[in-house]
Image (cartoon, grey):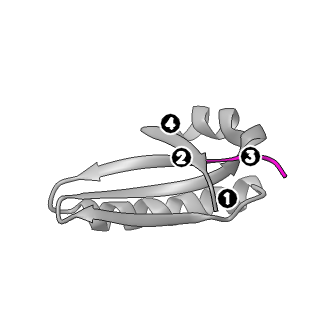
Amino acid sequence: MEKKLKLIWDFRGPDAQKTAEHHEIHLKEFIKAENLKNEITGVEIISDLYAVAFLVVNESEMISVRDRLRPHRGEWYNL
C-alpha cells in the first residue's frame, strides 16, 4: 500500500471556517478534474479564528499536486 500525504492549507481570521469550507469545494473539483486516486478532503476547525482545509494524496501524486495547488504545509497521513 502506497504512503499517503495530507496537504494542508491554513486559514486565519474571523472568516477562517467559511474560507476553509469554500477551499474544500475547490479541492473536490480538482480531484474530479485530475482523476486522483484518493477522494479524501476535509476541514478542521482549530479555533474560532483558525481553520484548515486538507487533501490527501498518494506519495506518487504529491509533487505534481503540490506544485499546482501550493499547500502551506503537509504531513504523513495515517488512517
Find numbered disc 2 in the image and state the secondary structure of the residue it sits on.
strand
31 in magenta: no
Q: Position of residue 56 (x, y in %)?
A: 62, 54
Find numbered disc 3 in the image and state the secondary structure of the residue it sits on.
loop
Marks 3 and 4 sit apart, C-alpha to C-alpha, by 20 Å
Q: Relative to 68, is 78 above or below?
A: below
Q: Position of residue 16 (x, y in %)?
A: 25, 60
- The residue depicted at 51 percent of the width and 41 percent of the height is 74
Asked whether, in this view, residue 7 is left or right of residue 30, the answer is: left
Give the residue type at disc 1: Ile
Circle number at residue 62: none
**Residue occupied by mark 4:** 70
N-terminal of the pair, mark 3 or mark 4, is: 3
The image quarter containing residue 23 is bottom left
Give the residue type at disc 3: Lys
Say which of 11 and 35 sits in front: 11
3 in magenta: yes
**Residue occupied by mark 3:** 3
Asked whether, in this view, residue 62 is left or right of residue 20, the answer is: right
**Residue occupied by mark 1:** 31
Find numbered disc 1 in the image and state the secondary structure of the residue it sits on.
helix
Residue found farthest to the front: 78
**Residue occupied by mark 2:** 7
- The residue depicted at 62 percent of the width and 64 percent of the height is 40
Which residues make up the magenta segment?
1-5
Marks 4 and 2 sit apart, C-alpha to C-alpha, by 9 Å
